[in-house]
């Protein structure tokens, strides 16, 4: 057990068990020893790799997606382009490079990077230096009453979830407890939670609720419905609700124990796209999708983009082809990863999504 684990055990001894969401928040964001506070998790030397780190085509196509959504809505004036959880800044760099094809779009932008991690903020600042558009950082999404484009790749899977387990008594919350030696473990709350519904699930079924994710999407949807713009969420997850436990811990590209050494492993959970779409509707906006990342990127023209890159970089043709395949094939990221778009009601359907 490491130092953060000992601190969490002391907290539990003092005030009682933590919800899984509370545990995730501390393990990921403790300012001294939290996972995101202390390291860059991305890339070959890190714990996991994401679509923009696989190939520049991903971010370029999303850049053109932003331009098209903006044009479809009558080129609204000063627009906030917000990225949630920008990682190493790679996706935003690719978006802005592709958007140079539309100088009037670039000229209308203020870019806001919503990032909790000081380590990643520094990498983003370095990566985006000299990009030619005004940049600023924020720790959370804040609306400022103007047209809004929001991009989130592999952000929502990092938000905390609560877990409930079906018992003969009802849905009981899974809690994190600590034994006499300070070793962390899971246990069920003795009493069922009266607000979790779904009486016909078999005993042992697990349901996950991502309240922070839904609240954020509802807030963004409300701004988009009112001031125009759009949101694109790309992440791994399931399309139509469903029970099941999906909390996972990853270290060095392999699964790990979620509780053993808090702050040293990435914690994430599958995104419940149906819940996010419902949150968008609650905010008064229209959800499109989710559709598979592969179908989405194919519809945006990844094949043609990859061919053009291969023609201009013949020595890298193999790498470009394998990046394209990794992004779109069902065996890799093509179907587990999904795209959900959120637009004002009545806006033209977003590029890449069936109308
Ligand atoms: N979008 C990037 C990085 C994904 S990793 C990519 O695709 O490569 C998750 C990102 O979300 C990291 O930048 C992490 O620091 C950030 N993050 C996680 N939880 C956050 C929170 N609660 N608030 C702000 N940023 C958060």
Image (cartoon, rainbow, N blue to C red):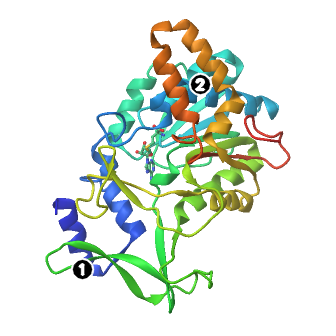
Q: Which mark is residue 60?
A: 2
Q: For ligand 1, which image quadrant applies?
A: top left
N-terminal of the two: label 2 or label 1? 1
Residue 69 shown left or right of residue 340 in the figure: right
User: Badge 2: how crowded within 10 Å, few (<14), some, or many (20+)?
Assistant: many
Above or below: residue 28 compared with residue 105 = below
Instruction: Name, please, the residue furthest toward the right.
Output: 346
Q: Identify the residue at image location x=56%, y=70%.
A: 243
Looking at the picture, tell me which residue is in the foreground, 107 or 59: 59
Q: Is residue 291 visible?
A: yes
Residue 101, percent from left and from top? 67, 16
Question: Which quadrant of the figure contains the N terminus?
Answer: bottom left
Q: Which mark is residue 14?
A: 1
Residue at disc 1, secondary structure = helix
Q: Identify the residue at image location x=74%, y=59%.
A: 281
Q: Quadrant of residue 109?
A: top right
Question: Which quadrant of the figure contains the C terminus?
Answer: top right
Q: Which mark is residue 97?
A: none
Residue 230, percent from left and from top? 70, 42
Q: Is residue 135 visible?
A: no
């Amino acid at each position: 057990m490491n130092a953060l684990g000992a601190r969490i055990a002391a907290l539990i001894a003092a005030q009682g068990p933590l919800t899984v969401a509370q545990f995730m928040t501390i393990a990921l964001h403790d300012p001294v020893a939290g996972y995101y506070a202390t390291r860059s998790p991305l890339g070959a030397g890190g714990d996991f790799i994401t679509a923009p780190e696989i190939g520049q085509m991903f971010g370029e196509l999303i850049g053109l997606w932003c331009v098209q959504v903006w044009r479809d809505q009558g080129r609204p004036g000063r627009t906030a382009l917000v990225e949630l959880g920008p990682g190493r800044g790679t996706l935003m760099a690719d978006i802005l490079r592709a958007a140079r094809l539309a100088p009037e779009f670039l000229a209308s932008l203020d870019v806001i990077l919503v990032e909790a991690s000081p380590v990643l903020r520094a990498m983003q600042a370095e990566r985006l230096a000299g990009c030619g558009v005004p940049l600023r950082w924020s720790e959370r999404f804040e609306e400022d009453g103007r047209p809004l484009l929001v991009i989130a790749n592999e952000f929502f899977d990092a938000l905390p979830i609560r877990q409930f387990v079906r018992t003969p008594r009802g849905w009981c919350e899974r809690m994190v407890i600590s034994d006499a030696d300070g070793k962390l473990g899971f246990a069920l709350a003795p009493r069922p939670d009266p607000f979790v519904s779904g009486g016909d699930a078999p005993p042992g079924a697990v349901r996950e609720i991502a309240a922070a994710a839904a609240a954020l999407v509802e807030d963004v949807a409300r701004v988009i419905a009112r001031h125009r713009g759009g949101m694109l969420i790309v992440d791994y997850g399931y399309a139509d609700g469903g029970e099941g436990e999906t909390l996972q811990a990853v270290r060095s590209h392999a699964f790990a124990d979620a509780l053993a050494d808090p702050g040293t492993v990435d914690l994430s959970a599958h995104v419940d796209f149906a819940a996010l779409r419902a949150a968008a509707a609650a905010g008064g906006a229209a959800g499109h999708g989710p559709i598979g990342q592969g179908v989405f990127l194919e519809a945006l023209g990844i094949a043609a983009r990859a061919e053009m890159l291969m023609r201009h970089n013949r020595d890298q043709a193999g790498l470009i082809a394998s990046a394209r395949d990794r992004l779109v094939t069902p065996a890799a990221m093509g179907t587990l990863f999904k795209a959900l778009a959120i637009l004002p009601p009545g806006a033209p359907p977003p590029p890449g999504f069936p109308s």
